[in-house]
Image (tube, rainbow, N blue to C red):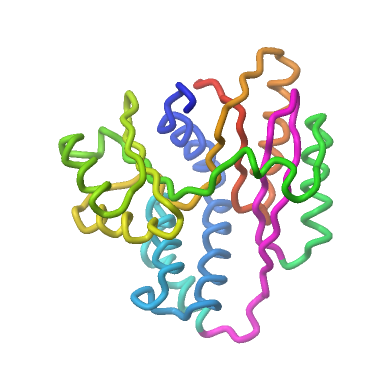
Amino acid sequence: MSGHSKFANIKHKKEKNDAAKGKIFTVIGREIAVAVKEGGPDPENNSRLRDVIAKAKANNMPNDTIERGIKKAAGDADAVNYENVTYEGYGPNGTAIIVVALTDNKNRTAANVRNAFTKGKGNVGTQGCVSYMFDSKGQIIIAKEDCQMDADDLMMLALDAGADDFSEEEDSFEVLTDPAAFSQVREALEKEGIQMVQAEVAMIPQNYVTLTDETDINNIRRTLDLLDEDDDVQEVYHNWDEPEE
């Protein structure tokens, strides 16, 4: 596991997103629409929607915005049909990047993703070319500053609820679960009033790559920034051991 602070990375990502909060809300709004379409508007009977709501709350999305999104998706028979698409490719020096998108126009999204890779001197590869370097895991990050519970008690709570792994960083706790157990673990923590800065099923790199060349670092940042700016892009996973700023 990388030695850097996951919380610092997430905080950095969040702060960056704060400048473009509309983007993160658009991303989650699409996920809400897809979840409602697949399983209905009642979170009690729709575990995917419950998970998206938890993600929305972790990103400080207001409750009324969440509720409006659910009502709109439930009442709009002519809502846009979004498709899930995943792209895999390489950044500088063999770094692995996975891009998850929800789009109503696959050609547009594919062109934008390819452009982001090309501008960072990387390239889009075939399906499966890098995903074997990642594990799909439920990932919950809890900031120590937000958590009153003793570390051992928190660990036991998570493991008893079905978590696979619990680790303590300098400023945060990380809970990893099998994707199938993610919802029950998150809900067990939620019931105890545990605040989470991240709660989602993510692609976790098995190993991290360190970049030392300044050009490589600038190129991968360029790719990640361009992908971040694209409204179709939901998530970007990579195995670059991003330095803390």
x 35%, y 40%: residue: 165
x 78%, y 38%: residue: 117
Relative to the observer, which residue lies in front, 98 or 42? 98
Could you tell me residue 95's position as x and y percent? 69, 29
The stretch of residues the image draws in magenta is 75-103
Could you tell me residue 98's position as x and y percent? 66, 44
- Is 63 above or below relative to 212? below
Relative to the observer, which residue lies in front, 151 or 107? 151
Q: Is residue 243 left or right of residue 175?
A: right
Could you tell me residue 80's position as x and y percent? 67, 75
- Is 37 above or below relative to 132? below
Q: Is residue 199 left or right of residue 192?
A: right
Task: State yes or no: residue 90 in magenta.
Answer: yes
- Is 112 above or below relative to 1? below
Q: Quadrant of residue 42?
A: bottom left
Could you tell me residue 230's position as x and y percent? 69, 49
Q: Quadrant of residue 190?
A: bottom left
Relative to the observer, which residue lies in front, 185 or 27? 185
Task: State yes or no: residue 81 in magenta.
Answer: yes
Q: Is residue 57 left or right of residue 20?
A: left
How many discs mark residues in the rendered view? Answer: 0
x 55%, y 34%: residue: 206
x 61%, y 19%: residue: 210
